[in-house]
Amino acid sequence: MLCGKEKFCIFADKMVNKMVKIKQAEAKKGLKRILDRSHVFVASMALIILWICSLVAMNISFFDPIHRATKNFSLSDVYYQIMQESGNVHRSELITIVDMTTLYDRGRMAQVIHEVNECQPAVVGLDVMFEGLRGDTVGSEQLVEAICEIETPVVAFKLKEADPETGNFVTARHSFFAPIDGLQEGYTNVQHIDLGGIIRNMSTWHILGSDTVHSLSYYLASKFAPDVLNEGFPQRQLIDYTPTDFPVVPYDSILQNRHLIENRIVMLGAMNDDADMHYSPFGRTAGTCIQAYAVQTLLEHHNIRELNFAWTLLISFIFIVLTDILQCEISYQAKRSRSVVVGFFFDSSFVKSAINFLWMAFLLWINFLVFTQGDIYFNPTIMLMGIVLQVEGRLFYVSAIATYREIKTKKMKNKHKKQQKS
């Protein structure tokens, strides 16, 4: 006969085994809920609804302002502004800008270039176009002599008239003294989405006629660090706008700021000329400053990788599926709750929207870390809009299932009636 202690141990073992089986069954049910095919259907519907809405926005003139605004929006601009506002701005030790906004006399320009050359810069870039003699023959001659004195000069030119079929440029606009033996020219064309759009990309080379020409920023970087030529940079890449304070020296204070010019890349340009102001993530920015950011991007080898549409769509789809799993699991646990108040609270649309908002904020934070630490830019627009439309996708799925069951029930009833009649 078993004693009381042995009976208790057997009973305890049975209870433990029963609890383990219950937990295993719950785990299987939970896994089944997670792997339910409805999540894929809901995510697909959310993306289809988003695609339909985008088609409407693109093809109806009423939505044209909205389409333009979203087309020219990039969350990377917000990231750079966050970094700037947090005080995370470093001072450049490689690049100095000489501001020549109010300088028009070519003889005085020649003197400024001569003073810069006296300070022994590593490379000098002229982000200025000198068109025609303008009746100042003496000043123009002095300007050419001063430029020829520079050991490593790079001067600007503009690409003009691109072929609409090939995208190659047909003509270019040069300074009056070009070409000169030993003088390197680099184009200063900047790329933007639209007129007045934000400049986020740069190109390192283009085709002009049958020749390959490089940008001003590319030649400045390659002359300062020759190994840049062997890096094999893509034609088009994102500019790294990590907030940087480029020292700006007035043209009449060159010799007083020798320490900011010696052994540096020196760029001569206009910092306050309305004709050369463009939009960057920081607002209106001088073209010379944007060129400085482009040079810095090449020198520091910050090739920010922008995920293509296929990867963006795949990642967005995965996170919309995860959102639907999260929302369904919250609803399931709310229904199982013994407290009516807790169940009602977590099953309310307000709480679900709040959870979606916190979930999106978390994903944006992860995206920010990937962008700042991994130099990978993922455009989260599709993902965020898809998460917002996840509720609509779930409602569509529930309605579709209810309609299918209703149709199936009617067919069964009709079949049953026919069998009774026969």
Image: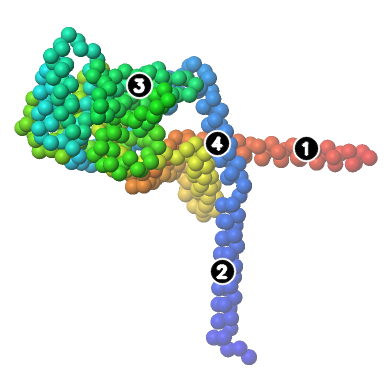
User: Compared to 188, does 220 lie above or below?
Assistant: below
Instruction: State the residue at coordinates (43%, 37%).
Output: 379
Q: Position of residue 132 (x, y in %)?
A: 23, 13
In screen coordinates, is 258 left or right of 394? Answer: left
How far is mark 4 from mark 2, CA to CA? 40 Å
Q: Residue furthest left?
A: 256
* Mark drawn on residue 19: 2
Q: Are marks 1 and 3 in contact (CB under 8 Å)?
A: no
Q: Which residue is mark 4?
A: 46
Q: Residue at x 59, y 75 (%)?
A: 14
| Mark before the other along the chain sequence, 4 or 3 | 4
Residue nearest the observer in this picture, 403 or 14: 403
Foreground residue, 311 or 259? Answer: 259
Residue 69 in view? no
Q: Nearer the viewer, residue 93 or 221?
A: 221
Q: CA distance from mark 3 to mark 2?
A: 76 Å
Q: Position of residue 84 (x, y in %)?
A: 25, 37
Q: What residue occupies the far right of the structure in this picture?
A: 422
Q: Are marks 4 and 1 in contact (CB under 8 Å)?
A: no
Q: Quarter of the image containing the N terminus? A: bottom right
Q: According to the image, label 3 marks what residue?
A: 159
Q: Quadrant of residue 115?
A: top left
Residue at mark 1: 410
